[in-house]
Image (spheres, grey):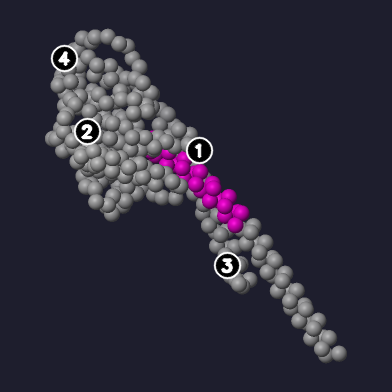
Amino acid sequence: MASLQDLRRKISSVKNTQKITKAMKMVAAAKLKRAQDRIMSARPYAHKLRGVVANLGEHASRTSHPLLHKRTGNKTELLVITSDRGLCGAFNTNILRRAVEFLHERSKAGEQVSVSVVGRKSVDFFRRRTWTIRQEWPGVFDRLTYEHALDIGQNIIQQYNEGTFDQLYVVYNEFKSVMQQRVLVEKFLPIEALEDESSEQPAAEGPKGSYLYEPDEHELLEVLLPKHFEVQTFRVLLESAAAEQAARMTAMDGATRNAGELIKKVTLFYNKTRQAAITKELMDIVGGAEALK
C-alpha cells in the first residue's frame, strides 16, 4: 500500500502535468486560429485553379504535357504527410495506418511502390519499415511557407517526368472542424485524375466549351500545370497543419480534464488513508492509556 508521502508526490506530479497540458492546449488553440485562417483563405483559390485545369484537361491533348499523359506503367509513389511532433491524439496513427493499407493493396496488385514522406513522424515510421523511401522532408511544419510546397512540388514533378514513378497518390488529414479531421487519399498525378470521384473533393466548377490559346496551348500548360500542382501541394500542407493543431488542442483538452479527475480520485484516497492512519494512532493511544490504568 502506498504511503502518504508517495500519494502527495503523485498528486503533485499530476498537477504539474495538468499545468503542462493546459498550456499546450492554449498554445495549440492560438496556432489553430492562424492555421485555420490560412487554409480558409487558400481553399477558394486552390479549388478554382483545380476547376480551370480540369476544364482545360477535357479539351487539351493528353500528349501535350507530361503531367496530363496517362501512363501504362505500374510504378506508384505515395506521399505521406504527417506532423513533426506528437501529443496530438490519433492524428498520425490514422494517417500511417491508412498509408500502410494503401501500400499493401498496391503491392498485392503487383505494383512497384515507393514512399516520400513529409513530417518527422512519418520519417521515423517508414525508416523502420521495408518500403523504399525516395525523399524525406522533415521539419516542414515548424515554419510552413509556400517555398516548402515549391521544393516538394518541383522535386516530385522532376522525378515524375524522369519516369521514377507513373502515378502519385497523397495521404493526409483534411481539416473539417476543431473536432473532426478526415484522412484522405488523393491521386495527384497524372493531373487528369483530379476529376476522379475517389478524391472526395468538390466537383470542379467552371465554364464549359472550347478554348482559344494565346500564345499557344503548349506554353500555357507548361506554366499552368506545374503551378497547379504546387498550389495543390501547398493546400494539403495547410490542411494538415490546421488538422494537426485541432487534434492537439482536443487531445490536450482531454488530457487536462483526465488529470483533474485523477487528482480528485488520488486526493480522496489520500484523505481516506490519512484518516485511517490518524484513527489507528488514536486507537493505539487510547489502548495504551487503558493499559496503564
Could you tell me what secondary structure mostly forms the magenta stretch?
helix
Element assignment for label 1 = loop
Q: Are marks 1 and 3 in contact (CB under 8 Å)?
A: no
The residue carrying mark 2 is 167
Which sits earlier in the primary sequence, circle 3 or circle 2? 3
Q: Residue at x 15, y 20 (%)?
A: 64
The circle drawn on residue 216 is 4
Element assignment for label 4 = loop
Q: Is residue 284 left or right of residue 240?
A: right
Q: Residue at x 31, y 52 (%)?
A: 124
Q: Residue at x 34, y 49 (%)?
A: 121
**Nearer the observer, 87 or 61:** 61
The residue carrying mark 1 is 179
Is residue 79 one of those drawn in magenta? no
Q: Which residue, as the protein is rendered here, is positioned at the far bottom? A: 292
Segment colored magenta: 238-262
Give how far across and how far down residue 281 sits, in percent.
74, 78
Q: From mark 1 to mark 2, how far is it between C-alphas? A: 33 Å
Q: Is residue 99 left or right of residue 247?
A: left
Residue 59 quadrant: top left
Q: Is residue 27 left or right of residue 102?
A: right
Which sits earlier in the primary sequence, circle 1 or circle 4? 1
